[in-house]
Image (cartoon, rainbow, N blue to C red):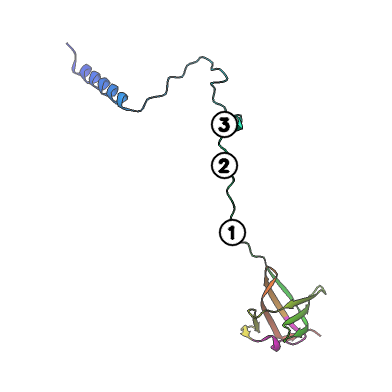
């Protein structure tokens, strides 16, 4: 006669056997016998190139979503100004002479409150700060009260 514990073990074994039959097939057991070089899995770098599918590299978009914008500032004293031609020439602290074309969309301000002015309001000798993005003038700020002698 079988004990009650034995019946439970037999039942568990038979249920486990049924689950194994319905489950996906298992991998064969690993043997200690050395495998031949042809059957050993090789790392991807050692596999021949013909076995790997060839895919074309993904094309990069012509314009990235966020391109880096080179921002710069230049300070100096106004040497010449031509409001009709929209040209401004300044002399930097290093003594370099730089000429700029001022577009219609350039913001021109003066003083501490950054009051909006026109290019004609800037005079020779005024100290200015020119802000650029990718070498294009975006703003000109004049310190009208301060003049170079």
Query: How many residues crowd mark 1 within 10 Å: few (<14), some (14–19), many (20+)?
Result: few
Vertical placement of 141 versus 23: above or below? Answer: below
Q: Is residue 70 above or below residue 138?
A: above
Residue 127: x, y in percent?
Answer: 74, 81
Which residue corresponds to mark 2?
55
Viewer-side residue, 82 vs 54: 54
Q: Earlier in the sequence, mark 1 or mark 3?
A: 3
For the residues labelled 1 and 2, the Cα–Cα distance comes to 23 Å
Q: Position of residue 103 (x, y in %)?
A: 67, 79
Horizontally, residue 48 falls left or right of residue 97, namely left
Separation of marks 1 and 3 at Cα, in angstroms: 34 Å
Callout 1–callout 2 Cβ contact below 8 Å: no
Q: How many marks?
A: 3
Q: What residue is drawn where x is 68% and y is 67%?
A: 134
Provide the residue span drawn in magenta.
Answer: 117-127
> Circle 1 is placed at which residue position?
64
């Amino acid at each position: 006669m079988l004990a009650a514990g034995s019946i439970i073990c037999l039942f568990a074994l038979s249920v486990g056997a049924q689950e194994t039959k319905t489950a996906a097939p298992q991998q064969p057991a690993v043997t200690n016998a050395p495998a031949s070089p042809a059957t050993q899995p090789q790392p991807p770098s050692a596999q021949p190139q013909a076995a790997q599918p060839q895919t074309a590299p993904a094309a990069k978009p012509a314009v990235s979503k966020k391109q880096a914008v080179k921002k710069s500032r230049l300070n100096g004293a106004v040497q010449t100004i031509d409001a009709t031609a929209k040209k401004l020439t300044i002399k930097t602290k290093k003594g370099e002479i730089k000429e700029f074309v001022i577009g219609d969309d350039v913001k021109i301000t003066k003083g501490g409150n950054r009051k909006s002015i026109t290019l004609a309001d800037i005079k020779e000798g005024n100290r200015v700060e020119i802000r650029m993005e990718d070498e294009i003038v975006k703003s000109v700020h004049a310190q009208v009260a301060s003049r170079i002698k």
